[in-house]
Image (tube, coloured by chain):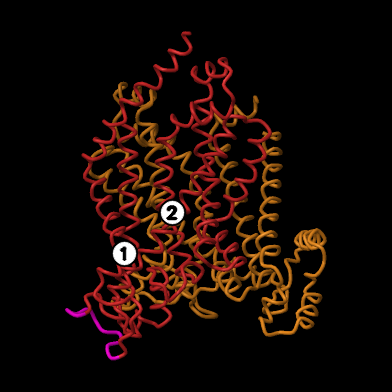
Amino acid sequence: MSDVTAEVAVTVPQLKAEPTRWSLLLRRPTFLIGAAIVLFWIVCAVFGHRIASYSPLAQQLLSTNAAPSAAHWFGTDNIGRDVLARVIVGSREILIVTPLATLLGTVLGTVLGLAMGYFSGLLDLLVSRVLEAVLALPAVIIAFLFIVALGPSVPTLIIVIGLIFTPLIARTVRSSVLTERHLDYIASARLLGENPARIMYAEILPNVLPSILVEFTVRLGYAIFTVATLSFLGFGIQPPTPDWGADIAYANQNNALLSGYWWQVLFPALAIASLVIAINLITDSIEQVLAS
Amino acid sequence: MGLFLLRRLGLMVLTLWIVTLIVFFAGQVLPGDPGRAILGNLASQQSVQVLDHQLGVDRPLLTRYFSWIGGLFRGNMGISYTYRTPVEPFIRAALINSVKLGLLAFVIVVPLSILGGVTAALFHSRWPDRVISIAGLSLATVPEFVSGSVLLVIFGVELKWLPVSASAGAGASDLSQFRHLILPAIPLVFVLFGYIARMARAGTIEALNSDYTRTAVLKGIRRSTVIRRHVLRNSLLPTITVIATQTGYLIGGLVVVETLFDYQGIGSLIYKAAVGKDFPMLDAGVLIIGVVYVLATLAADLLLMWLNPRLRAEEGSS
């Protein structure tokens, strides 16, 4: 009987702590700034076509390479497409691909990490080796290899990036599980005869959830980094779909910078930087709140 | 020590073997028919079959894997689909160029990020710490092509301080080569700074809170001496491991930087191979990166053992 009460005692303060953590987060200016920027880009991704005064694909051949002006705030590119419209609508694909890829990686990594940490032994040893081998190759390179082989498309991007992130997340979850494993509530759950799946998902998972959440936001930042880089290299989101990375690559191919058409590179670059920095502000404040 | 080394080497070989499986699977199984990929959709089935036979890709998978692996042991990394010559000389030349660029980036970033991390730790939770931590984290996740493009505009195009291409040309002096490599090295420095500074900061904070530091302070030793003798010596050890693991990210960044600055390194070699669907070249390049990474982590582990008497004793007793 005492085992049952011990288990209850562990879960109750957790539930009570949840709202205070949330309000602590809302009190942090870094979190609010980060969330505001992310929200801004989400609005752009959803309503982009209605917000932009031009179509991102419309070519105005009479005003090519136009500098920023009242008509075109961010100027135009070499075939007269409005850079502002492309920056606004360019948020769409990346905000579809990166959260889904990160979510896939987080779910798979959590399942794998829980099993590795809980069962240890041979499974842990074998999977650890495979994970280490995947980690020996930089994410961009391994994504490259698979995307070249499979051909670039949105589903391929999501799956490949999700799978690349799986080992990293599995490793984090595994080490959190290893510290939980020896605590009393696990021993009592085992003595109660709960099956491993229940212990892993109902007992351990809620306790390692905070570190999974941090890992998710960290990986989301990397996913944006990776997708933008792949698009820049021509193996991510494909033109003519507006995309920040691909648009910078397109401007570079047309020697935009050498010709002084800096707006074709600068504005998409700032868009990527703002999104990545916003995610980092959120990550940083979540970490701070969890640490306090 | 001997046993540790042996186990470490064993694990390394196992990791490398799995790397070869991944590369073989992605580079030779997934792409399907290389002959068709090279000749395009319009080529006749017969000419595709002839080419496949010439390339040796019509053999069973297992045979192909073993002949590929066997070749690697003899220093034969395959025949490029594009150039129809061995890929090994291309890889060698590219690797030397990339090592130059990578080393320059490391020489700049290691002292800079350790200084940043230690400074942040000494001002723990105050504004210098917040600024360094958030700036580091942001720089680390802004893609190299973004920072590289911006730097190109400012220093290469507008101010004209530094050359816009990384290649100094054949027979250029060392100084000229160095000048050409500064601008490409900076985006790599940006990305690496965040990670290394973060580790140095965490290590320093831990050392600052330790009993031995408190003892030293209570003994009345000057703060600067405590930091130099007691804190830094302990806090910088874990940083070494991070520096080694960052080689992987560094190489990933090379693909972008070398393409952006038109530099003939392993990154641009891989990129060109990928664009041209030159799978033997791509596989060899990716494999070399895996080998470099694994060797770098091994070197870091050994260095750590040598520097840290505690670890040496623990490993010896176990």
Residue A70 falls inside the magenta stretch: yes
- Based on the picture, tell me whether residue B214 belongs to the magenta stretch: no
Q: Main secondary structure of the magenta part?
A: loop
Q: Quadrant of the C terminus of chain B?
A: top right
Residue A219 spot, x, y in % from top left = 44, 49
As helix, strand or loop, the secondary structure at mark 2 comes to helix
Residue type (three-letter) at the residue carrying disc 2: Tyr
Residue indicated by mark 1: A271
- The residue lying toward the viewer, choosing from A89 and B145, is A89
- Camera-side residue of B279 and B190: B279
Chain letter for the residue marked with disc 1 in the picture: A
Name the side, left or right, on which B315 lies relative to B46. left
x, y percent for residue A125:
65, 36
The stretch of residues the image draws in magenta is A62-71
Q: What residue is shown at x 52% (from left), y 66% (from top)?
A: A153
As drawn, A204 above or below B192: above
Within 10 Å of disc 2 (Cα), the crowding (few <14, some 14-19, many 20+) is many
Q: Residue furthest left?
A: A70
> Residue A223: x, y in percent?
44, 55
Assign a secondary structure to mark 1.
helix
Q: Amino acid at mark 1?
A: Ala
Chain letter for mark 2 = A
Say which quarter of the image contains residue B95. Answer: bottom right
Q: Which residue in the structure is indicated by mark 2?
A: A222
Tell me how far mark 1 sits from mark 2, CA to CA: 15 Å
Chain B: its colour in the image is orange
Q: What is the quadrant of the N terminus of chain B in the image?
A: top right
Residue B65 point in image, percent of width and height? 77, 60
